[in-house]
Amino acid sequence: MSAMRATSPPPAASGDGFSALDACHHKTLDLLDELSRLIAQLGQGQPDAAMRASAARIALHFSTTAREHHEDEERHVFPAVVALGQPGMVEAVLRLQQDHDRLEEEWFDLAPQVQALAAGRRCDVPALRDGAAALAALYHDHIALEESFIYPQAQGAMPAAGRRDMGREMAARHRAERAARRLPQGSVGSRT
């Protein structure tokens, strides 16, 4: 278990954007653990309903919430740190941006296996195991750098009102994105 997770996550509803970002980190790490447990169960036969539901939750998180989270960081956190103008922080932000691309690529490769599990189809268990291990290792390193170095710097650079504004903007954008995903194709603006 990671030291980052020794305490319970802060409430996401506090209005501070960093609380929501921290809560997403905890959820991501929890789902990576869930994926590891799911893979361990695969040797025991076909996936049952609980295993399929678990895979569906994992696929949804990494296909939507994790992407939104990275956008939140790139929109709000990274610019605040870069504005401080300190070379070490700028280098860390560049590394984290590259990590976001790598995390997306790792998930892109892993997603078909997880989605197959969610649908109750066969998957390539060794590929799933290897991909999940690579994704988990990258996320653990990435989150550790953000929580130990980047987030504290960004929080110090933002006044409380700015952190609340960040939280409101993130929540409004995520609500709009969820609503857009729920709409049937071609239904925007059309009434029959």
Image (cartoon, rainbow, N blue to C red):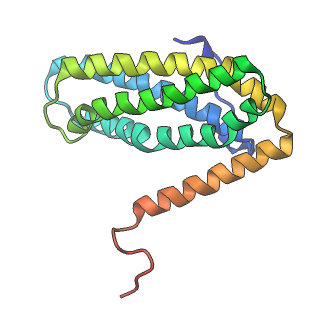
- In depth, the one of 72 and 120 nearer the eye is 72
Q: Is residue 156 above or below residue 144?
A: below
Q: Is residue 129 left or right of residue 176?
A: left
The quadrant in which residue 46 appears is top left
The quadrant in which residue 95 appears is top right
**Residue positioned 51% across, 17% down in the render:** 140
**Residue positioned 57% across, 34% down in the render:** 24
Which percent across, then down, holds residue 31?
A: 43, 28
**Residue positioned 35% across, 88% down in the render:** 192
Which percent across, then down, holds residue 152?
A: 76, 24
- In depth, the one of 78 and 192 nearer the eye is 78
Which percent across, then down, holds residue 186?
A: 34, 73
**Quick check: can you spot residue 182?**
yes
Q: In this view, does 152 lie to the left or right of 57?
A: right
The quadrant in which residue 143 appears is top right
Q: Is residue 105 above or below residue 91?
A: below
**Residue positioned 45% across, 31% down in the render:** 101
Instruction: Tally the numbered discs.
Output: 0
Outermost residue toward the bottom in this view: 192
**Quick check: can you spot residue 11?**
no
Q: Is residue 8 above or below residue 179?
A: above
Q: Is residue 39 left or right of residue 9?
A: left
Q: Is residue 159 left or right of residue 76?
A: right
Which percent across, then down, holds residue 17?
A: 70, 41
